[in-house]
Amino acid sequence: MKRVSIFGATGSIGQNTVNLIGRNRDEYQVVALTGSQNISQLIMDAKMLQAEIAVTSDPSRLTELRDGLVGSGIDVAAGDAALIDAAARPADWIMSAIIGAAGLRPGLEALKHGTVLALANKESLVTAGPLLMSEAERFGSTILPVDSEHSAVFQALVGEDLTTVERVIITASGGAFRDHPLSALDNVTVEEASKHPNWDMGQRITIDSASMFNKAMELIETKEFFGVRPDQIETIIHPESLIHALVGFKDGALMAHVGPHDMRHAIGFALNWPFRKDLPVQRLDLAKIGQLNFLEPDLARYPALMIAHKVMEAGGLTGAVFNAAKERALDAFIAGACSFTDMARIVDRVVDLVLAREGLQNASITLDNINEVDAMARALTSEEIAKLES
Ligand code: NDP
Ligand code: MG
């Protein structure tokens, strides 16, 4: 039986993973399930999948978790250290689907144990790509991308020679405000930004799709995971979101990955890798779909794409700065402390401010350095937000 753990089991990716594992229950031994605030879901799934341990990141919720699992034989634990301990439990396959920078440390721990890490947590690659990739190599672990675009690129590259890749084209739906008047973007609400035209995802990533910060993260992920240069990475708006990514080769061929909007495809691909098995996803009827459209992204509407290229060119710890500033700016937008368009202005400014400080690009990518620039970027972002309020 395959031993599996799901970090961020109560979230959108986590629940899709629980769904796939629950459908073939007898093939898996579930080791750890983790969540944060959604304790009732964590309890239900831990019982359903007979997990060895259930962990919440929030120590104040431990009693509730323990009470819910009393008599089940399932271990319980809480806090960041408990998450890392859970990641050290032997498993053949670990889903990394915690949201935000909090996903990095459990992922790094998992890599130390020769596992397959199915990586949905894009923040890990954005903040610490080189560290993650080198740790995987050092410990003989494998990272498989779960973000749909990167799973698509990975699948398009099977059997190919990476040196023949000319470009990688990442598709973007254009998010909630693709057709919204540009001049009215400043006044859009959190509720409006939380509706995705095609995908059903968590709130934060949905807002990041509207601002294209999500795509910006994905461009950086592409560079870090596949080792391609920033000038080889392109973005195209594809409103139907059916082509998830394309890889262009030296001979002019473009390999596209086409599939429904259902994260269970990318999750299932990683779960079954290196094999393909039946997945409960819709089969596309191309004649019914009729046509696929493509548009050049308007950089005035999506400044996050320009910031991503700046971050990729600068390299080093700039990704950690970008991610932290973006997370903080998104908190502020959700809390009503800044407008939708302020987010990109603020993140751009913070990236510039930190880049102006010497040594950042050359500093080594260690957890300590990442934590330091993360804290610095969050503080600078808070200062920029406070300036707006005053
Ligand atoms: P959700 O917000 O739906 O879920 C996040 C998960 O992380 C939940 O289990 C949550 O627990 C847990 N969590 C939240 N804060 C912490 C913390 N501080 N420490 C530990 N655990 C925490 O996110 P998504 O599932 O949408 O996204 C997960 C990751 O996958 C992100 O990195 C996202 O960018 C990426 N991704 C998501 C896609 C999607 O379709 N949703 C597509 C591609 C990538 P609880 O809910 O119990 O509070
Ligand atoms: Mg994606």
Image: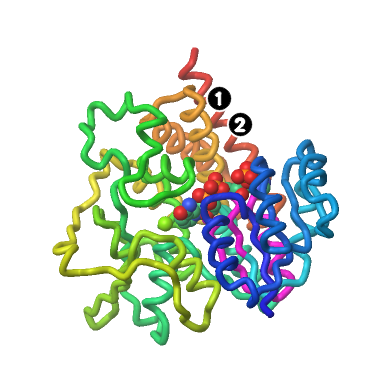
Apparent side of residue 236 relative to residue 314 in the rendered image (left or right): left
Kindly indicate the quadrant of the structure image that contains residue 47. bottom right
Range of magenta residues: 95-122
Q: Which residue is mark 2?
A: 379
In the rendered image, the vertical position of residue 286 relative to residue 311, given as above or below: below
How far apart marks 1 and 2 lie (CA) works out to: 6 Å
**Residue 57 appears at what percent x and percent y?**
72, 45
**Residue 342 appears at what percent x and percent y?**
40, 29
Packing grade of label 2 (10 A; few <14, some 14-19, many >=20) is: some
**Residue 318 in sight here:** no
In the rendered image, the vertical position of residue 260 relative to residue 211, given as above or below: below
Kindly indicate the quadrant of the structure image that contains residue 95. bottom right
**Residue 63 appears at what percent x and percent y?**
82, 40
**Residue 228 appears at what percent x and percent y?**
42, 69
Quarter holding the N terminus is bottom right
34, 21: nearer the viewer: 21
